[in-house]
Image (tube, rainbow, N blue to C red):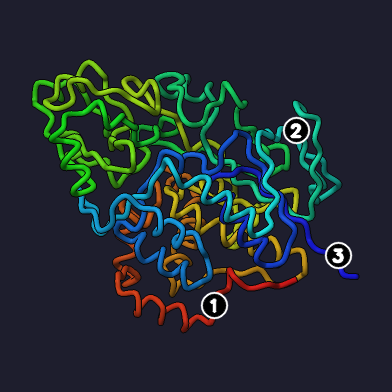
Amino acid sequence: MKRISKIVVIGGGWGGCAAAASARKAGAKVDLIERTDMLLGTGLVGGIFRNNGRYTAAEEMNNLGSDFFKLLDDNVTHKNVEFLGHHHASLYKVWTIEPIVKKYLSDLGVNVIMQCRIDDISRNENKILAVRSKKINKVIKGDVFIDTTGTSGVPANCTKYGNGCAMCIQRCHSFGTRVDLLSKAGIVHWDAKRADGSVGAMSGACKIAKESLSSDIVDELEEKGCALVPVPAKVREDINLLCKKACQQYAIKDYIDNLVLLDTGPVKLMAPFFPLENLRRIPGMEKARYEDPLAGGKGNSMRYFGFANCEETLGAIGEVDNLFCAGEKAGAMVGHTEAIVTGSLAGHNAVRYTIGEKLLELPDSLAVGDFVNSTIKKMKKPEGRSYKYTFSGSVYFERMKEQNLYSINDKEIAERVKKTGLQGIFDREMI
């Protein structure tokens, strides 16, 4: 009887969930290990997809066999939202999406292991044999391992490079910090740098309780999905948050002159933090209260520590052969859409590795392929690590348009995927 491959995914954010799904659909046994009591990681406070080039990426992934954008499309607060620099965005319900994703994975047959913080590996020469959680005395064996643990979640980094622990959705003090498995596996890894040479970047948005805002702002949010609230000159004089933002597509002057609010269930404020005493001086925000990060008046989580050196197939380059990476762990690829793309590819290739089949490199004729391939190349050079790459803006969206890869025509996108011969590739059983 043929032995079924065992894939172990470490980290239950969007990237980890996508990796687990594609590996399971390819026919492998899959353990998905999550440090906290909920899946999706920063996706629990995210909510934006299909904005700008993410529309193209979502449709390509639908045609490639991913189910995640169908799940998101069925659980939105608003569609076709327009806000500064962003078009045709959808906003998913952050309060309800996690159990939907968990059920989807369970129905696929993924073994989801919660509240299991991995802090060490066992290896033999060039192979990882198992990962271990010392606190709960658990050893999990596998044939291939996928690191999707992200690049944030260490309070010491938030204190050293940011404004201290903001008590955010990472919940490090309750569930333990992210452990750098790359160094334990002998993988070369890098930290991102900002334009001024400092390390890391601050997460780009906060959550505000909708009930704490004025009724006119709430009405506009619920009608349009977004609201633009001008910041009085006297309030913004001493506030400069642009240089701190992780998401460069939002680091423009309009996001200082205005509060950009999105309705994802709670209110998403498109700023890394905003001093509460100043926020409450803005008309309509006099009673505003932060939900996440709880210290959103002072700071936010720091990110972009510990990118892996990866191949375009998302195989990690180093002393072990059976480790793949996805999400931000694979490079400065920002966003939930981006994590689903890389996770799907990493999970699929993990199974290919176990059966000795050539690893898949997505073609440059697809936006998702060009995104992964060009970003991985740029990450090899120090100057490439000072940028963040996303379908929705900044340097990659500009490249996407230059390469004629940006489209919101569903039929055109489907035909593009068909020409590659990869239709349904992430829904294809290989074992």
How far, Cα to Cα, is label 2 from label 1?
A: 38 Å
Q: Is residue 422 above or below residue 191?
A: below
Give the residue number, with chain letter if any, for mark 2. Answer: 133
Earlier sequence position, callout 2 versus callout 3: 3
Location of residue 414 in the rendering, given as x and y in whole percent from the top left corner: 41, 78
Find residue 22 and report its image quarter.
Answer: bottom right
Q: Can residue 85 be seen here?
A: yes
Earlier sequence position, callout 2 versus callout 1: 2
> The disc labelled 1 sits on which kind of residue?
Leu
Residue 179 shown left or right of residue 383 in the figure: right
Q: Is residue 216 above or below residue 166?
A: below
Location of residue 388 in the rendering, given as x and y in whole percent from the top left corner: 40, 47
Q: 45 and 256: which one is in front?
A: 45
Numbered tag placed on residue 422 in the rendering = 1
How far, Cα to Cα, is label 2 from label 3?
A: 26 Å
> The disc labelled 2 sits on which kind of residue?
Ser
Q: 142 and 66: which one is in front?
A: 66
Find residue 299 and report its image quarter.
Answer: top left
> The disc labelled 3 sits on which kind of residue?
Arg
How far, Cα to Cα, is label 3 from label 1?
A: 27 Å
Give the residue number, with chain letter if any, for mark 3. Answer: 3
Q: Can residue 322 be seen here?
A: no
